[in-house]
Image (tube, rainbow, N blue to C red):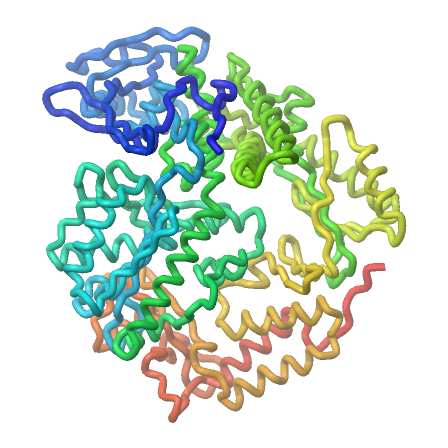
Amino acid sequence: MKANTQFDPLLSGFSSAPGIVAVEHIERKDSPDEIAIFQRKNGATERVEDRFEPFVWLQAADLLDGWGGEARIEQLAGDAPLKSLAFFESWHGLKQAVDQLKKKTKRTPTAPDAPYFFINDPVQQYLMLSGKTFFKDMAFSQVKRMQVDIETYTEPGFEFSNPDRDADRIIAIAMADESGWTQVLSGVEMDEKTLLEQFVQTVQERDPDVIEGHNFFRFDMPFIITRAKKCKVSLRLGRDKSVPATRASRFSVAERTVSYPRAAIFGRHIVDTYFLVQIYDISHRSLNSFGLKDVAIHFGIDAPERTYIDGSRIASMFDSDPEQLMKYARDDILETRSLGDLLSPIYFAQAQLLPFTYQNISVRGNAAKIDALLLREYLRQKHAIPTPDAAREFAGGYTDIFFEGVAENVHHCDIRSLYPSLMLQQRIAPTSDELGIFLTMLDSLRTFRLKAKEQLKSASEDERHYLDALQSTFKVLINSFYGYLGFSMGRFNDYAAAAKIAEEGRTLLKRMIEWINEHGGHPIEIDTDGIYFVPPSSGIEDFRQAFREWLPAGIEIEFDGEYKAMYSYKMKNYALLCDNDEVIIKGAALKSRGLEPFQRDFLRELVTLRLKGRDRDIPALRRSFEDAISQAQWHVKKLAKTERLQNAPSAYEDKINEKERGRNAAYELALKSDRAYKAGDQVSYYVTGNKKSVAVYEAAKLVSDWDPENRDENIPYYLAKLDALCKKFDVGNARQQELF
């Protein structure tokens, strides 16, 4: 199905240019800058170039007095502060002017009170100015996507590969694409240099628009770049035969921030499914791990008759049974392709609307996306823009917990777009939005989402895939409008409006809790836009219908989940037992990745027993774990922690000597080892000794140095850790709070 992106130009951009698959900025030394556009026409990819004038918003044109260069000035309509637009012939000229503005105003471009503003991304500027977006009149299946995954060797004595070590080479490169094609380049058949040269040749021949990988930015891409340099291979992966450019970047999603080396390939996008999985988990909170194998199993897309090899056995498997390793690599790439098929369409749909590259859309926050849509329309209408509202604290959404323990027959209701509904109902918008774009855009998004959902009912299977991605995109953007009002970097933010909406939302949600109680239900937890509750023992459909009818006009709820049981531990930390007996655990207190593996396993089994009403079996569970620790029944990996060295061990040592930080077990072990540990290496260690209270950095030992014939793990230490966990979760006291 070809995507119909001809919505309101306010949403989809005011240019109808079809088939754009990549846009790149080209700086010229002796002539104006240009933009290279790659377009799909009749199945072929063509390159065209367009003129580009980068721009800066100014409070007054005379701010550029004394700059020394040339700029074309346009005056903007309206009363907002930034009412002049300065255009430059080159990005270099613009940056020189910005440097002058910094010195002259003593304000950075991101300062809320700066009398100028610019977007530090030439491609985004071009897309906003031209109204163009990606993939118009294209279906997702028409995007050429290549998946890439590598397998690497690890030098004996180390636990994880490091590309800076000579022996830690690439031993397989697996590739696939949307057509069903797959290929595994084997390190048995060719040396690493030839392997990398063949990879580059394959990318150029198949000419993908997108390269996908799982944890590609943090592992595969930097590994490939480093090994290519060592092998003296020119990594000409760009459509112009250029090598990848890299820079440090950060990816933020909810409470997590991931630092990573961002890579860019000319004329292509890189999409990391590891990031897409984390974004998915923010709304679902159902993944126990972000690793490819676990995620594939969760989504039911694990490769048929999947080959599994523990990461620690990759090198030995390459030495002893390379054919089996190549099967493993092929299964990895099949799962990566399936994961991209599943999670990428929503970002494809966003790329048809937003003035960002496809690569950037998957790593940009939703508030920044709303800001870009507003700025694009103000730019189109040549209207002045405001300075951001000064950041200030305000009370947020309503969250509460009403019950701790295990409840049976738990239902969940989702308040559909609560804050957006309140905004539209009460006409709450930023006071700085002189054109009234904010609510117009929100209303249009809601209208188009309803249309897409209606079309889903009668759509073909191919159409359903696109329409579902489209309505999901609209939902994501709709639900971001409230957050945008409190976004400190938003040009049209408004903290007073955000506070008013939050107050109205809290009032309504509290009334909803009262209604549930008054009509025989039992609330368990509420979190901004969703309520877990136990309904009355009879008349559930009448209860639901009465609840819907009681709600104020414009507010809708969806009863979207029923569970056999819920273990409510504390706010935002709970577990659900589904009808198929799957257990969903949400919240760091119940599945923290900072716990040792045996603690996570114990918690999962404990929670499962409680959900199933088998509290009588919990003491036996505890005893089984105590016995396993006391009798040394487990491999030491179940007791071990793994940490990544963020800095070189020598840098850590310098900070210790300067008393700038405390001691850390992983770094201490790296320093004591006769192996050359580097920044980026992972270190797995366990605690030795025979006392429960020890300084871990003194008692730690590398897992690779563990001798199963002479076990030395600290049994009292690990028993004490288990005991602390049991006390935290009242193990030994089988009595649970009664709900009724």
Place residue 144 in its image quadrant: top left
At x 29% / y 49%, what residue is drawn?
Answer: 261
338 shown above or below 425 = below
Q: Position of residue 684 (x, y in %)?
A: 37, 72
Which quarter of the picture shows residue 414? top right
At x 25%, y 23%, the residue is: 98
Name the spot of residue 542 as percent of width and height, x first: 87, 42
Q: How many marks?
A: 0
Image quarter where the C terminus lies is bottom right
Would residue 421 be found to the left or right of residue 468 on screen?
right
Q: Is residue 162 visible?
A: no
Image height of 652 relative to 427, above or below: below
Q: Quadrant of residue 467?
A: top right
Front position in the image: 625 or 154: 154
Q: Is residue 479 visible?
A: yes
Residue 646's spot in the image, x, y percent? Answer: 31, 59
- Toward the bottom, the furthest residue is 709
378 relative position to 735: left or right = left
Residue 713 position (above or below residue 237)? below
**Residue 471 place in picture, x, y as percent:** 57, 34
